[in-house]
Image (spheres, grey):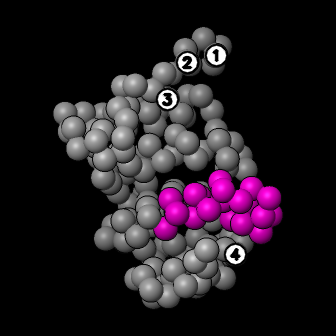
Amino acid sequence: MVSLKKLLAVTALGALMTEEQLRGKEPARTQALAKTTREDVPLLYWTMASWAGAISQRKTDLELVGDVPSVAAMLDRALALDEAYDLGALHEFAITFDPARPEGTTPRRQKEHLDRAMQLAQGEPRARERRGYSLGDLRVVDFQTQAE
């Protein structure tokens, strides 16, 4: 498995932050991520997607699982910089990732991400083909009933 240190060393993100800052506690992580710009969103997306994938595959590695807040911070920063990135890819990521956040999520928040992802991908078959599914294929529970 490629280490985060190696990943940062070969990407532009490495010029902006260290592994220690990204994996560290607040406010160091937020300060490091504040250096990123809209042009860094693709790097943020692919770094957090790979990192989250590693976490999901190695749930018994407590050091890696402890990185969930770092992935969450990267997602939050990417959404703040360009929430429409890649036809809603960040919102799609949030649908599956947000339940793993230490603070969790709510059905209403999940529905907001789903609705926004569908809105951003509407009329663009490339989004569905690239991801291998249609957002319309996702089944959504009745959030109104559950929220009451």
The image quadrant of residue 91 is top left
Give residue 146's mark. Answer: 1
Task: Locate the N terminus by quadrant.
Answer: bottom right
Horizontally, residue 81 falls left or right of residue 4, namely left
SS for dot 4: loop
Main secondary-structure element of the magenta-colored stretch? helix
Residue 60 visible within the image:
yes
SS for dot 3: helix
In this view, the residue in front, 57 or 63, is 57
From this view, report whether residue 70 is shown above or below residue 24. above
Work out whether mark 1 precedes mark 4 in sequence or the reverse, and give the earlier one.
Answer: 4
Work out whether mark 1 precedes mark 2 in sequence or the reverse, and give the earlier one.
Answer: 2
Residue 45 image position (x, y, % from top left) = 43, 61
Q: What residue would you read off at disc 2?
A: 141
Question: Which residue is painted at 48% across and 21% down in the image?
Answer: 139
Q: What residue would you read off at disc 3?
A: 111
Residue 145 image position (x, y, % from top left) = 60, 11
Q: What residue would you read off at disc 4?
A: 24
Residue 122 image position (x, y, % from top left) = 24, 33
Residue 16 visible within the image:
no
